[in-house]
Image: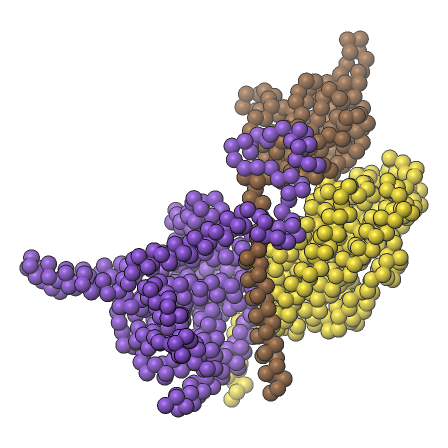
């Protein structure tokens, strides 16, 4: 009898196009949802609406011109893109940047990590319906952008890290401003915890949603905070230190369950660690062993022609393991440049973990992965 | 760079010549400097002075105007006498009088929306270290809502191709009419009430419950899947939150022994020990729990964050009013703010003694001023919640209602019984 | 039961803490810049609208080669005996394609720079034509744009500048 009622009540499935114009897809991602009531039974992410053919465009630029294309990949955190590209090209051409430039690179990539995670914090709050954290996050992000504007003239697309070093040294008064920001920023992290992290409604929505076990995260190729939230503490900064990360002391926060809340809180903790790294870099840059002005490797030609060959370099960008694979045929332009984007690989797991969620959870899961469509679609 | 060197380096900008100023890199608004000593900023001091001035000016104006309610009845008898002299039938006077009162009542939600939207925008902006609207109107964007209203008036009314045209048209009407009609038995001050119904409490809850029909109609008729989900969600949510909301008022009714709203407000006059007002919220445990449940359920009933599931912006785009534009959308908007005002008026009447002053020596201000002040404070609480909390999830919302709020409100009724037994 | 009560209490307490935070910020000064009436002057390294000085330019073509989006073009002036001179005949820059990357400024060999990023960030154009600027010798920093209505090159008059003379390195 009960079964009869159940089958009699069986309703039609509904197909919902979640995006590309949906307000919380963080760009132009489309997820084709098949729902029954509020429960999702099938989810197919559809990427490619923002495809600009950047990998092909690399082949039509010389090495210094191609740098500005990397800014446009993950436009929320452009510094690490520059850095990964430059590391790959330097490995290809056998250039060793000076130590001061390496400290500056670590400094700016950590500041970018803070700025990028602040965007994540804000937009995740908006996805959850809390608008105030968004503006608090952007208040602090604006300070980082001010610092970058002072340093390299760009507020979003920096082109600061160059092949062989960085484009400019710290201007006068920058260090003090940066310290002022860090001292202001650390108590704000506690504010964020009060406002969002430990809000019962927020925890209720995120702690049991989008669970990913460590093995599954590894098998789907997740990286960055998304992977570390599930348990595996893989961080390129520790596993394969580039720049000066082996000289800096910091910890890599990891989560346990791989829920949305773990992914969120991993990023919160990472911001605190990044603030510490920034302070260490500032201390190191003030030392006399690293004289101001030594920011470019000697003898880097204007028109770089690396010997024929291939090189791969990867770094821990704000969203995970970002790699550049550069192939040279000894001409001024790269023969092939492949980008291993973390967001693109992170978005793939959506089709598996969205099944069985509610519609409201799509927003939570998608938001917690912190994808940037500029990099997913390239 | 000091300001002098900048000035010699840059000539005066073209656009800024008539108004405005340049912010040098050093004077950029970094919160580090602004927040360290806000009282040193002249704008901050001026703002504080203006706020104090508005408060004291408002109080002085209320004191000068005095009690409004008792002046209304003589006015009516004057009109009656004049009608008798002229030989006009009395029922005509009564009809015109009722119509005038209805027009005044109709103005309440409209004026409220104009003010409350502006207030919400300002409060939310300052909670987020922004400023909100600043240009329209002479002072801090005071006429921003008027401008928005005009924009909504002259906007094109778009009806989707696959919408059910008639229901689509009818839905905003079904939403707005109960929202206005529900104001009838609300006492805005002493003797300042449109219809002094003896079952006022039941009337308000019954009428305001009709609006959910309009929301379902809006969601269903829009021909949009997101709207449909929003409409159905709201049906579930509003119907279930009616229960704890009504149950939480039952202790008040038990203690007051009447359903008449002005009688409930009037019963809370007086002070315990000459200091603590005899408001229902100050009845030990029962009052506070009833207030908390009523507040939460009211926020849910008015579809505001953290309970704005029906129009959940980030999930359902805009829920049931996705496909509405222009004046139809404005009606939804209006009814939302009307319900916020209604809930706050009810709370002020039920739990905060209506027009009773909080301290004995503050009795020189008229009752409507106190009622208004309490209502505005409660509206501020609504805004405060909205701009602090994230949104519930649909199933959690239901869990919260059925497994927490409803049992608590039921227990509270039992506690009220115990309290009455102890008091008697 | 005890766990449940402590959970309820903790949830309630955390909620209150969140409310207290927003209330505190409510009484702190706002940090907004009221844009049209208040304008931020950027830091000296800011990369705003590229400006061009036709007198300083030696028409070497470094910027043309450096530009990643290929938005610069120039022609050398030719002397009466047919020799190319280190001066421009014309110089164009398409603001619509410009990346604001700063590579043209870095490659410019003259001192002071002939092409550089000013601090002007109010890049507003009424038409697409206005984005393509042309300079001849003697033109001002912002150049002239073609106007198809009267088929003339003329300085764009409704252009908004945060300041007239930008920083030059």
Report x, y in % for residue B108.
Answer: 33, 60
Q: Is residue B82 above or below residue B294?
A: above
What residue is drawn where x is 29% and y is 58%?
Answer: B65
Q: Is residue B149 above or below residue C46?
A: below
Residue at position x 73%, y 73% from top? A257
Nearest the eye: B60 or C42:
B60
Looking at the picture, the colour scheme in use is: by chain
Colour of chain A in the rendered structure image: yellow
- Quadrant location of residue A67? top right
Q: Is residue C98 above or below residue B139?
A: above
In the image, which lettered chain appears purple? B
Query: Would you say A215 lies left or right of C141 here?
Result: right
Q: In the shown orientation, is residue C165 left or right of residue A173? A: left
Decide which of A124, C91 is in the foreground and name it: A124
Chain represented in brown: C
Q: Quadrant of residue C74?
A: top right
Q: Residue at x 71, y 50 (%)?
A: A144
Q: For residue A335, say whether it is visible.
A: no
x then y, percent, for residue A297: 90, 41
Note whether residue A146 is visible: yes
Residue at 26%, 72% in the rendered image: B196
> Which of B209/B317 is in front?
B209
Q: Nearer the viewer, residue C147 or A318?
A: A318
Find residue A84 and report its horizontal and vertical position in percent. Answer: 82, 50
- From the top left corner, tell me how far across and down residue B124 is, in percent: 52, 57
């Amino acid at each position: 009898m009960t079964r009869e009622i159940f089958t009699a009540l069986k309703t039609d499935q509904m197909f919902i196009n979640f995006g590309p114009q949906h307000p919380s897809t963080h760009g132009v991602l489309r997820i084709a949802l098949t729902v029954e009531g509020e429960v999702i039974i099938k989810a197919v992410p559809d990427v490619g609406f923002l495809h600009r053919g950047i990998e092909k465009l690399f082949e039509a630029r010389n090495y210094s011109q191609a740098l500005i294309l990397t800014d446009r990949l993950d436009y929320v955190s452009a510094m690490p893109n520059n850095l990964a590209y430059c590391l790959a090209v330097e490995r290809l051409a056998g250039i060793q940047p000076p130590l001061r430039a390496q400290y500056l690179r670590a400094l700016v990539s950590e500041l970018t990590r803070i700025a990028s995670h602040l965007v994540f914090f804000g937009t995740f709050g908006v996805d959850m319906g809390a608008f105030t954290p968004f503006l608090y996050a952007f208040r602090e992000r604006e300070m980082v952008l001010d610092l970058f504007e002072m340093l390299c003239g760009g507020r979003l697309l920096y082109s600061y890290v160059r092949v062989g070093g960085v484009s400019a040294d710290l201007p006068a008064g920058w260090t003090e401003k940066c310290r002022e920001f860090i001292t202001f920023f650390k108590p704000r992290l506690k504010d964020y915890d009060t406002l969002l992290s430990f809000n019962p409604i927020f925890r209720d929505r995120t702690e049991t949603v989008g669970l990913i076990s460590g093995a599954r995260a590894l098998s789907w190729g997740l990286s960055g905070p998304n992977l570390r939230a599930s348990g595996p503490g893989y961080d390129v900064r520790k596993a394969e230190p580039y720049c000066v990360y082996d000289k800096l002391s910091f910890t890599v926060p990891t989560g346990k369950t791989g829920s949305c809340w773990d992914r969120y809180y991993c990023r919160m903790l990472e911001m605190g660690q990044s603030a510490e790294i920034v302070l260490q870099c500032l201390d190191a840059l003030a030392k006399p062993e690293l004289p101001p002005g030594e920011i470019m490797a000697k003898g880097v030609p204007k028109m770089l022609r690396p010997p024929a060959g291939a090189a791969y370099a990867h770094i821990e960008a704000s969203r995970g393991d970002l790699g550049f694979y550069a192939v040279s045929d000894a001409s001024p332009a790269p023969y092939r440049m492949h980008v291993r984007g973390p967001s693109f690989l992170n978005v793939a797991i959506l089709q598996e973990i969205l099944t069985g969620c509610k519609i409201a959870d799509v927003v939570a899961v998608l938001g917690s992965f912190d994808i940037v469509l500029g990099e997913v679609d390239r | 760079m000091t300001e002098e060197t900048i000035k010699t380096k840059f000539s005066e900008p073209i656009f800024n010549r008539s108004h405005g100023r340049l912010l040098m890199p050093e004077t950029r608004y970094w919160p580090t400097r602004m927040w360290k000593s806000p009282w040193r900023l002249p704008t901050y001091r001026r703002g504080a002075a203006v706020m104090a001035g508005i408060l004291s000016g408002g109080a002085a104006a209320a004191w000068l105007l005095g009690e409004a309610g008792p002046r209304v009845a003589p006015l009516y008898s004057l009109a009656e006498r004049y009608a008798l002299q002229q030989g006009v039938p009395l029922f005509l006077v009564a009809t015109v009088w009722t119509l005038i009162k209805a027009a005044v009542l109709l103005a309440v939600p409209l004026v409220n929306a104009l003010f409350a939207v502006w207030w919400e925008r300002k409060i939310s902006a300052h909670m987020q270290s922004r400023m909100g609207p600043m240009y329209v109107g002479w002072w801090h964007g005071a006429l921003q809502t008027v401008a928005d209203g005009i924009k909504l008036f002259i906007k094109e009314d778009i009806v989707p191709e696959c919408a059910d045209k008639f229901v689509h048209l009818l839905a905003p009407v079904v939403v707005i009419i109960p929202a206005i009609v529900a104001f009838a038995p609300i006492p805005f001050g002493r003797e300042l009430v449109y219809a002094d119904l003896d079952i006022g409490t039941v009337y308000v809850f019954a009428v305001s419950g009709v609006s959910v029909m309009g929301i379902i109609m809006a969601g269903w008729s829009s021909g949009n899947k997101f709207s449909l989900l929003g409409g159905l969600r709201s049906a579930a949510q509003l119907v279930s939150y009616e229960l704890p909301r009504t149950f939480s008022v039952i202790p008040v009714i038990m203690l007051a022994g009447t359903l008449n709203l002005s009688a409930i407000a009037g019963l809370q006059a007086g002070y315990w020990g000459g200091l603590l007002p005899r408001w229902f919220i100050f009845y030990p445990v029962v009052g506070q729990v009833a207030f908390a449940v009523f507040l939460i359920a009211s926020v849910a009933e008015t579809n505001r964050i953290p309970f704005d599931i029906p129009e959940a912006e980030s999930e359902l785009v805009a829920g049931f009013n996705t496909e509405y534009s222009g004046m139809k959308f404005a009606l939804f908007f209006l009814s939302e703010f009307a319900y916020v005002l209604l809930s706050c008026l009810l709370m002020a009447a039920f739990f905060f003694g209506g027009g009773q002053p909080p301290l004995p020596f503050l009795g020189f201000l008229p009752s409507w001023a106190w009622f208004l002040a309490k209502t505005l404070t409660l509206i501020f609480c609504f805004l405060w919640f909205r701009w602090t909390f994230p949104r519930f999830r649909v199933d959690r919302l239901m869990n919260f209602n059925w497994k927490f709020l409803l049992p608590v409100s039921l227990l509270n009724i039992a506690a009220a019984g115990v309290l009455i037994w102890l008091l008697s | 039961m005890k766990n449940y009560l402590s959970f309820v209490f903790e949830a309630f307490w955390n909620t209150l803490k969140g409310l207290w935070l927003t209330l505190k910020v409510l009484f702190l000064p706002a940090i907004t810049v009221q844009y049209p009436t208040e304008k931020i002057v950027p830091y000296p390294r800011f990369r705003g609208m590229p400006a061009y000085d036709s007198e300083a330019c030696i028409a070497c073509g470094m910027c043309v080669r450096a530009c990643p989006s290929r938005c610069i073009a120039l022609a050398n002036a030719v002397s009466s005996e047919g020799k190319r001179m280190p001066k421009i005949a014309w110089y164009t820059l398409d603001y619509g394609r410009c990346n604001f990357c700063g590579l043209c400024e870095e490659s410019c060999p003259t001192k002071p720079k002939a092409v550089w990023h000013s601090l002007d960030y109010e890049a507003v154009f009424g038409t697409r034509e206005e984005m393509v600027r042309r300079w001849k010798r003697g033109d001002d920093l912002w150049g002239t744009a073609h106007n198809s209505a009267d088929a003339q090159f003329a300085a764009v008059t409704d252009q908004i500048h945060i300041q007239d003379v930008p920083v030059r390195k």
